[in-house]
Amino acid sequence: MVQRRIERAARRALEGALRAFDLRAARDEPDESLPTVALNRPILIAAFEGWNDAGDAASSAASYLADGWAAEPLAEIDPDEFFDFTEVRPESALLDGGARRIVWPTTAFSLVPGVQGARDIVLLRGPEPQLRWRTYCAALIELARSIGIERVITLGAYLGEVTHSRATPVTASSADPVLAERYHLSTSRYEGPTGIVGVLSAALAEAGIPTISVWASVPCYSLPVSPKASLALVQVVARLAGREVDLDELERDASDYEEKMDELVAEDENVAAYVSRIEEMEQVVDSELSAEGLAEEIERYLRNNRSS
């Protein structure tokens, strides 16, 4: 009974949003069912702002890919069911002519059409919801099925004991044995509190949709936004998606970030001492953490932030 209620609520959340967009499909199905969209072996790339997004690295990476690939709006999920607007507030914006518009914190899908037979890519971006996670994930899966998503790549970022001057550690894992073997991925052994990325990944696995989870490590002493971690995520995701992207702008931002981080360390003795200790640890492990070490870092971060 609970599962049926979740599925019905998910369908209601999607029907209006899907009908509001031209999804390149003939709508000859009954009104109560979701339209089927003809895409070419599509991949879904998902990133959420909030708990799983240290240094805004994951959400910024997804936005950079959307801009670099000229993604087209596809669909949105109505936020009323899933967001507490006292936590994630809508924003007021002025339009040309002085009219005012309220911009709501929605989950937005955009489409990157494939060229010359390449896979289509669908990007999912939005804040982590506060309410009805099971219904929310069911809605995302319903949409994924309706447009024939064959694979999902989720993005995340966590605060770890790494230095800003080294290459950003990135780990990728998958519970799907085919993907794990093809891309030489680890299998996550994590147990503990999780965010929407973990809940969605588990729901996708139960639905039989193969998923790869990609995480970047952001220095604990980092500035609020880390373009360097975003760059690392973009590079890995572009390879996994089989699609090139111009990195020039993001590489410049990452270089500027490193310079500002150098200044931060130089100006604060306590930070400098902390960074020195991390550098000693990095030298012990030959400047990079192993995949197992990264998994342990992620587990520690999630457990320490369970109340966030």
Image (cartoon, grey):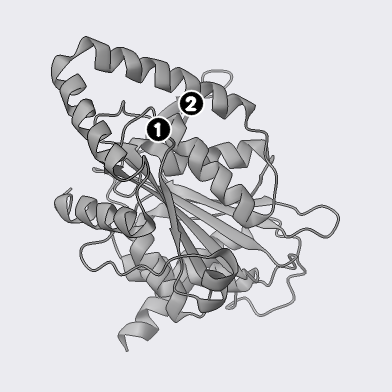
Residue 128, numbered circle: none
Vertical placement of residue 293 versus 224, above or below:
below
Q: Is residue 96 left or right of residue 139?
A: right
Q: CA distance from mark 2 to mark 1?
A: 12 Å
Residue under label 1, please give it. 166
User: Which residue: 46% across, 27% down?
Assistant: 93
Label 1 element class: loop
Place of residue 263 in the rendered image (x, y in percent of width and height, measured from the top left) = 32, 12
User: Which residue: 53% across, 75% down?
Assistant: 209
**Label located before the other in sequence (2 or 1):** 1
On the question of residue 89 being in view, the answer is: no
* Residue 36 in which image quadrant: bottom right
User: Which residue: 49% across, 63% down?
Assistant: 212
Q: Residues within 10 Å of mark 2 (few under 14, many from 20)?
A: some
Q: Residues within 10 Å of mark 1 (few under 14, many from 20)?
A: few
What's under tag 2, amino acid-wise? Ala
Q: Is residue 34 left or right of residue 120?
A: left
Place of residue 143 in the rendered image (x, y in percent of width and height, measured from the top left) = 56, 68
User: Which residue: 55% across, 72% down?
Assistant: 181
What's under tag 1, amino acid-wise? Arg
Quarter the N terminus occupies:
bottom left
Place of residue 63 in the rendered image (x, y in percent of width and height, measured from the top left) = 54, 39
* Residue 2 in which image quadrant: bottom left
Vertical placement of residue 80 versus 229, above or below:
below
Label 2 element class: helix
Residue under label 2, please give it. 254
Q: Is residue 306 left or right of residue 262?
A: left
Task: Please tell me which residue lies in front, 210 or 142.
Answer: 210
Q: Is residue 117 left or right of residue 210?
A: right
Task: Please tell me which residue lies in front, 118 or 220.
Answer: 220
On the question of residue 293 being in view, the answer is: yes
